[in-house]
């Protein structure tokens, strides 16, 4: 497709919300409107908007003054996989799934969408790759505070979440010091420890527990006791929600049956706090940061990165380079095919330089 034949584009945001989504929407829409005179349509609540035909034109006013706003003006959903969409429940209350892809294709045709800029994480890109196989044209933009998308060195929203988690750890530090306690702070990230690793290192956490390095409770406790013997009457533990003991399992908060990603992790900090108290006699408190990490104004880095990603996404669409994900590699904005990232997660290598640096300054990962 040539630049002159692309007339109308759609924008959707899928998965969990994240600081910087509106910055991408703004970059795509304003560049399309101002520079190329294209029509821009907003798709509400991710793939759910395509399924339910909630698609509307966007004006310049709609996408103005949103650069600094958290969340997404289009709304989002992490329960709308067109290939396996919950359309009801059976007699036992279990969800009934159907493939509603034909409905999505019809709605996209009705609105004349030549291309869709799809902003999301690994689940969203997997859904886009499935629809692309049926002829829809997508360009993806990598969004997640977890920083776990394959093919890109960083995702927008990550640095803001690191800043929020670091500030929380800094604040917990003063309370831990005052009350001589072991304080555990549970941080998001699912199966990837990037957010916990970065914020833990930035805040000087004494123990960092991430999914990629299973921990030994005895060694976590020993690190806390060793600090006490050195005259440090408190310990800060940054723990990823996906952390697990050697030979053990992750702590699951709940199962959402009608979601494409049904497992919701959470509660490992509370489990660990109780275990440390019982085994080592140390007073513990646990704080789960939860969704506070995903909210609020994006930091300057994420606003700039989101703008660069959004602009590149539109350029790819105009060049007819569809089913590509915009990425940053070695400081350069480029792209990779969907199939190289769909259904995959970028985890922290156990020999990552940040882990080596953390170990160097005495941080324990509960494994040695």
Image: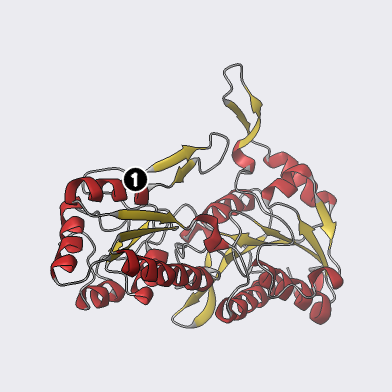
Work out whether residue 210 or residue 99 is closer to the camera in this orientation and state it. 210
Horizontally, is 252 left or right of 139 in the view? left
- Give how far across and how far down residue 185 sits, in percent: 39, 59
Work out whether residue 306 or residue 130 is closer to the camera in this orientation and state it. 306
- Name the residue at 32% across, 74% down: 204
Work out whether residue 42 or residue 227 is closer to the camera in this orientation and state it. 227
The extreme top residue here reads 91
Horizontally, is 252 left or right of 360 in the view? right
SS for callout 1: loop
Instruction: Tell me if mark 1 has few (under 14), some (14-19) or many (20+) residues whose alpha carbon lies within 10 angstroms of its own.
Output: some
- Give how far across and how far down residue 44 sits, in percent: 75, 53
Quadrant in which the C terminus is drawn:
bottom left
- Name the residue at 33% across, 60% down: 183
Residue at numbered disc 1: 250
- Give how far across and how far down residue 332 sits, in percent: 50, 82
- Name the residue at 35% across, 54% down: 285
Position of 55 relative to 172 (above/below):
above
For residue 86, which quarter of the picture?
top right
Position of 70 relative to 136 (above/below):
below
Horizontally, is 285 left or right of 119 in the view? left
């Amino acid at each position: 497709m040539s630049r002159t034949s692309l007339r109308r584009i759609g924008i959707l945001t899928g998965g969990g919300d994240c600081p910087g989504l509106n910055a991408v929407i703004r970059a795509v829409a304003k560049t399309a409107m101002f520079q190329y005179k294209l029509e821009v349509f907003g798709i509400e609540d991710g793939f759910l908007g395509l399924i339910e035909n909630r698609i509307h034109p966007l004006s310049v006013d709609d996408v103005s003054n949103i650069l600094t706003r958290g969340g997404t003006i289009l709304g989002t959903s992490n329960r709308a996989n067109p290939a396996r969409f919950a359309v009801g429940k059976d007699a036992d209350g279990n969800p009934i799934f159907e493939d509603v892809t034909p409905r999505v294709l019809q709605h996209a045709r009705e609105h004349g969408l030549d291309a869709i800029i799809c902003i999301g994480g690994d689940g969203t890109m997997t859904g886009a790759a499935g629809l692309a196989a049926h002829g829809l044209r997508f360009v993806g933009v990598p969004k997640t505070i977890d920083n776990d998308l394959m093919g890109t060195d960083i995702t927008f929203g990550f640095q803001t979440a690191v800043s929020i988690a670091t500030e929380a750890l800094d604040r917990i530090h003063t309370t831990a010091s005052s009350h001589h306690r072991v304080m555990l702070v549970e941080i998001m990230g699912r199966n990837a420890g990037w957010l916990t690793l970065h914020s833990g290192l930035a805040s000087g956490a004494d123990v960092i527990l991430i999914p990629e390095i299973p921990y030994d409770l005895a060694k976590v406790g020993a690190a806390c006791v060793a600090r006490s013997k050195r005259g440090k009457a408190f310990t800060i533990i940054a723990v990823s929600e996906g952390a697990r003991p050697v030979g053990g399992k992750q702590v699951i908060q709940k199962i959402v049956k009608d979601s494409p990603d049904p497992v919701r992790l959470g509660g490992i900090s509370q489990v660990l706090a109780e275990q440390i108290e019982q085994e080592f006699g140390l007073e513990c408190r646990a704080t789960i940061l939860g969704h506070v990490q995903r909210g609020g104004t994006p930091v300057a880095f994420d606003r700039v990165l989101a703008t660069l990603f959004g602009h590149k996404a539109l350029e790819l669409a105009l060049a007819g380079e569809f089913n590509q994900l915009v990425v940053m590699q070695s400081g350069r904005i480029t792209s990779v095919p969907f199939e190289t990232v769909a259904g995959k997660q970028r985890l922290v290598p156990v020999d990552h330089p940040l882990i080596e640096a953390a170990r160097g300054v005495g941080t324990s990962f509960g494994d040695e």
